[in-house]
Amino acid sequence: MRRDPITLEEWKSTFVAALGLVIVSFIAWYGLSRLSETTAGDTIGTVATVGLTVWLVSQTWYYMTNVKSPRRQLLLMGISFIQVVPFLFAAVYGSFGYHDLCVVGASGPADVLYFSYVTFTTVGFGDLHPAGLCRGLAVAEAITGYILLGLFVAAAVGIYARSHTYD
């Protein structure tokens, strides 16, 4: 098989992997952000935070060691960075509970997902803000977003520059 996929058949495994990432992150967000107040809290939140960390490290390792095609890497990075990472951070925020336990002003899953995207993109509108342990998590998400979005743009520019010649 060629280094860079061209046909739909060659892209099939990459699309399946990307779809898997989307589904897993959505299920994690859906499940963890809907925990009851008696279930959610520091223990579940800490376990979810550790799980998120392991997932981020494993995905980074996988992209760097097993995905050889730059175009495949770019697609998987884009899916991960634009959809998966904010959804997983939102799942962790939700696992700490609501009523100002983690994100002040958040009253449900949609609010923590919104907060996660605003934090990941480093927009920071200020209408919602983290409290307690989630302050450190929000800082980690902002740094992660800053770095990952920059890497994504750099990878896209690098692929474009390699495929075009300049006279």
Image (cartoon, rainbow, N blue to C red):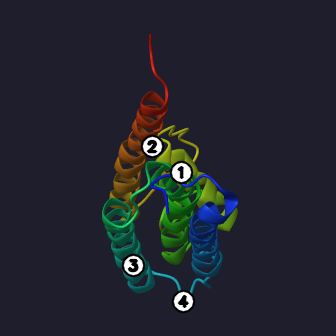
Q: Nearer the viewer, mark 3 or mark 2?
A: 2
Mark closest to the chain's N terminus, 4 or 2: 4
Classify 10 Å Cα crowding around label 1: few (below 14), some (14-19), many (20 and above): some
Label 3's element? helix
From this view, report whether residue 126 is shown above or below residue 68.
above
Q: Could you say which disc has been placed on residue 78 in the image?
A: 1
Label 4's element? loop
Label 1's element? helix
Whole-angstrom CA distance, mark 3 to mark 2, is 23 Å
* Amino acid at the residue labelled 2: Phe
* Amino acid at the residue labelled 1: Gly
Q: Residue at x 42, y 32 (%)?
A: 162
Question: Which image quarter: residue 55?
Answer: bottom left
* Amino acid at the residue labelled 4: Thr
Whole-angstrom CA distance, mark 4 to mark 1, is 33 Å
Q: Position of residue 35 (x, y in %)?
A: 61, 83
Q: Residue at x 57, y 56 (%)?
A: 79
Whole-angstrom CA distance, mark 3 to mark 4, is 17 Å
| Residue with the mark numbered 3 | 51
Horizontal side of residue 156 vs 58, given as left or right = right
Q: Nearer the viewer, mark 3 or mark 1?
A: 1
Q: Could you say which disc has been placed on residue 39 in the image?
A: 4
Q: Position of residue 135 (x, y in %)?
A: 37, 57
Whole-angstrom CA distance, mark 1 to mark 2, is 7 Å
Whole-angstrom CA distance, mark 4 to mark 2, is 37 Å
Horizontal side of residue 49 vs 92, given as left or right = left
Mark closest to the chain's N terminus, 1 or 2: 1
Q: Position of residue 119 (x, y in %)?
A: 49, 48
Label 2's element? helix
Q: Nearer the viewer, mark 4 or mark 2?
A: 2
